[in-house]
Amino acid sequence: MTGNVAGDVIRLERDGLAVAVSPQGGAILSAHWKGIPILAPTPSPGLASRVFGAEACFPLVPFGNRIEHNGFRFEGRDHSLSPNTADPLVLHGDGWLRPWAILRQDRHSIVFQYRQDASDASPFAYEATETIAIGDDSLILSLNVVNRAGRTLPYGLGFHPYFPRTPKTRLFARAKRYWPEREKHLPGAAAPLPEDLNFSEGAMLPERWLNNAFDGWDGTSRIEWPETGLSVSIEASTGLDHFVLYAPSATDGFFCFEPMSHRPNAHHAPDGGLVSLASGETLAGTIALRCQAGRA
């Protein structure tokens, strides 16, 4: 099946796992396991769908988060980008704001494709493919991007899921460093993990504003919701060794754990995790969300 049907809602179901997706933004709109939400639609309108305003997860391509000054220098050449939302800095690349074509679809999976040409607004020209597949107790998201520009450029990718936040939600995730947030929601200087952001043994999220990048992630994490008796493990492929943790408050009902191949503003850091792709080269990443009843 092929097409470009922005506005449609497509449902994938298998053995208690139900996922609703949209070609607009390549977004997941909801995900439930045995009727319990494992992803939380964001209450903020106007993100990927611009119609539904209820994305539970969307792809980050060809980079995640913000780029300072809306530009960067690479291999002796300056590149400029235009802001793509109300934010003054370009945010999360292109795919989350555009319709994707449907390449293949069945009851348990769907494959989206998005093509972007270079323009005055961005130097990136690429082809991205996103696969959303469900197993008996798992939701598997795969994303790859092929550089179609005529020159080598730095690429990154990631996923932006929203998870339910209950009063007793616990997060397990091991990381080596974090970046405090500075002005314009950009990362500051790297620092050791503060005690209230060390989730290596499991901890509840602090009740303050959180918008921080972490690196040295081992690619595995777990979220537990004692109120529902459900836990979800997150397993990421090699190369997705960064994550962003975003939680505006303890009462908003959601938080974001965003696996990424690079850290925010990596275009201004030589060790930020971006991958230089020559024309025709590919970058890929996968995460699997596995549902379990009770503690893993």
Image (cartoon, rainbow, N blue to C red):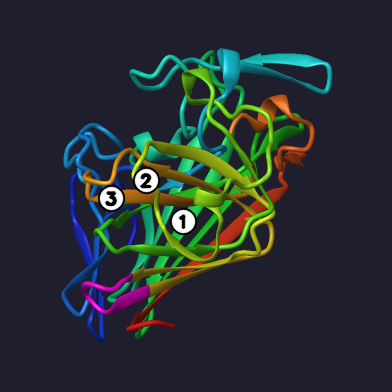
Image quadrant containing the N terminus: bottom left
Q: Position of residue 257 (x, y in %)?
A: 44, 52
Q: Where is residue 233 in the image (x, y as percent from the top left)?
A: 45, 72
User: What range is drawn magenta here?
Assistant: 225-231
State the residue at coordinates (48%, 25%).
185
Q: Can residue 259 be seen in this view?
A: no
Give the number of the mark in front: 1 or 2: 1
Marks 3 & 1, CB-CB < 8 Å contact: no
Determine the CA span between mark 3 and mark 1: 24 Å
- Mark 1 nearby-residue class (10 Å; few <14, some 14–19, many ≥20): many
Nearest the eye: 186 or 133: 186
Q: What element carries label 2?
A: loop
Determine the CA span between mark 3 and mark 2: 26 Å
Q: Can residue 249 be seen in this view?
A: yes
Q: Where is residue 150 in the image (x, y as percent from the top left)?
A: 72, 30
> Which residue lies under the disc numbered 3?
254
Q: Earlier in the sequence, mark 3 or mark 2?
A: 2
Determine the CA span between mark 1 and mark 2: 9 Å
Identity of the amino acid at label 2? Trp
Image quadrant containing the C terminus: bottom left
Whether residue 265 sits left or right of residue 51 in the image: it is right
Residue 189 vertical position relative to residue 295 in the rendered view, above or below:
above
Q: Position of residue 244 (x, y in %)?
A: 51, 45
Q: Is 228 a magenta residue?
A: yes
Whether residue 29 sits left or right of residue 104 in the image: it is left
Q: Is 10 a magenta residue?
A: no
Identity of the amino acid at label 3? Phe
> Which residue lies under the disc numbered 2?
100
Q: Which of marks 3 and 1 is nearer the N terminus?
A: 1
